Image: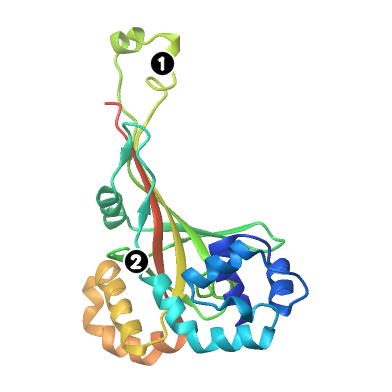
């Protein structure tokens, strides 16, 4: 439980895991600005700092509310910088047309873990499922950050000799050697779905997308095997950035 709480604190204030462990235990003082920020955003009383039992009892009583609040936060998008940047709505359309996404998250002392996954989108949430064992199950803990990449339309375009001759050295890269593509990067937080009815509804959505001709077997399979053997996750999108390059 303390690990999840520290991840939430780090997201609000930054800092290292070791530093926040020390502050919760009272072995290190918390900066006043951080204490005030956590009081404002999470409701954690300032005078609890330095008393590990008080801090953890407070979090234990409110953990579900804190997680739910983070799940319902609004998606942010980066300010448009170039003519190629696309809106949130257009970025969501890229997800809707895609068949898979690539999810990445850090492994302490072991680089970055990346995996391609089937998914389905509903609003600002991406839903995925996976086995109850393995690296994904180990890393995909509530509120952990996961970066998602999706590539949409892609293709080279033909240029005739006259068009190639019209390019000068200043725009070779952006012209002759460019490709048409659409891509989106999303920063998300993962939450495990524990409610059985919600899990079942999500698995049905995945089945409708990837195995629509097998829906008549869904009830049988989900009750016999899928609910028992799989985890279902939602990736709550916090920030999204999309780009579409169309040269020709």
**Above or below — where is 79 with respect to 142?**
above
Give the image location of residue 56, x and y in percent. Answer: 61, 85
Q: Front-most of 169 and 77?
A: 77
Which label lies toward us, 1 or 2? 2
Residue 125 numbered mark, or none: 2
At mark 1, the secondary structure is helix
Residue shown at 44% from the left, 61% from the top: 188
Q: Earlier in the sequence, mark 1 or mark 2?
A: 2
User: Which quadrant does the C terminus fall into?
Assistant: top left
Residue shown at 31% from the left, 72% from the top: 206
Q: Is residue 24 left or right of residue 150?
A: right
Residue 128 visible in the picture: no
Give the image location of residue 122, x and y in percent. Answer: 28, 67
Q: Front-most of 112 and 216?
A: 112
| Alpha carbon separation for disc pair 1 and 2 | 39 Å
Residue shown at 40% from the left, 87% from the top: 227
Q: Residues within 10 Å of mark 1 (few under 14, many from 20)?
A: few
Give the image location of residue 239, x and y in percent. Answer: 40, 55
Give the image location of residue 3, x and y in percent. Answer: 63, 76
Quadrant in which residue 47 is drawn:
bottom right
Residue 146 visible in the picture: yes
Quadrant in which residue 78 is drawn:
top left
Name the residue tied to disc 1.
Answer: 171
């Amino acid at each position: 439980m303390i690990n999840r709480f520290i991840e939430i604190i780090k997201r609000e204030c930054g800092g290292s895991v070791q530093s926040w462990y020390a502050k919760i235990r009272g072995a290190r003082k918390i900066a006043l600005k951080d204490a005030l920020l956590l009081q404002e955003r999470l409701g954690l009383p300032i005078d609890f700092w330095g008393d590990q039992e008080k801090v953890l009892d407070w979090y234990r009583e409110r953990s579900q509310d804190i997680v739910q609040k983070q799940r319902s936060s609004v998606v942010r998008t980066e300010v448009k910088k170039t003519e190629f940047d696309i809106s949130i709505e257009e970025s969501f359309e890229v997800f809707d047309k895609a068949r898979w996404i690539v999810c990445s998250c850090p492994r302490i002392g072991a680089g970055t873990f990346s995996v391609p996954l089937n998914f389905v989108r509903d609003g600002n949430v991406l839903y995925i499922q996976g086995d109850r064992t393995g690296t994904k199950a180990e890393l995909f803990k509530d509120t952990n950050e996961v970066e998602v990449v999706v590539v949409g339309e892609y293709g080279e375009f033909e240029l005739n000799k006259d068009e190639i001759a019209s390019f000068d050295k200043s725009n070779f890269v952006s012209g002759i050697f460019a490709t048409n593509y659409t891509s989106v990067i999303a920063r998300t937080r993962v939450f495990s779905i524990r409610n059985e009815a919600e899990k079942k509804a999500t698995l049905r959505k995945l089945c409708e997308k990837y195995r629509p001709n097998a829906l008549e077997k869904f009830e049988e399979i989900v009750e016999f095997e899928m609910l028992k053997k799989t985890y279902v996750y939602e990736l709550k999108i916090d920030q999204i950035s999309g780009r579409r390059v169309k040269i020709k």
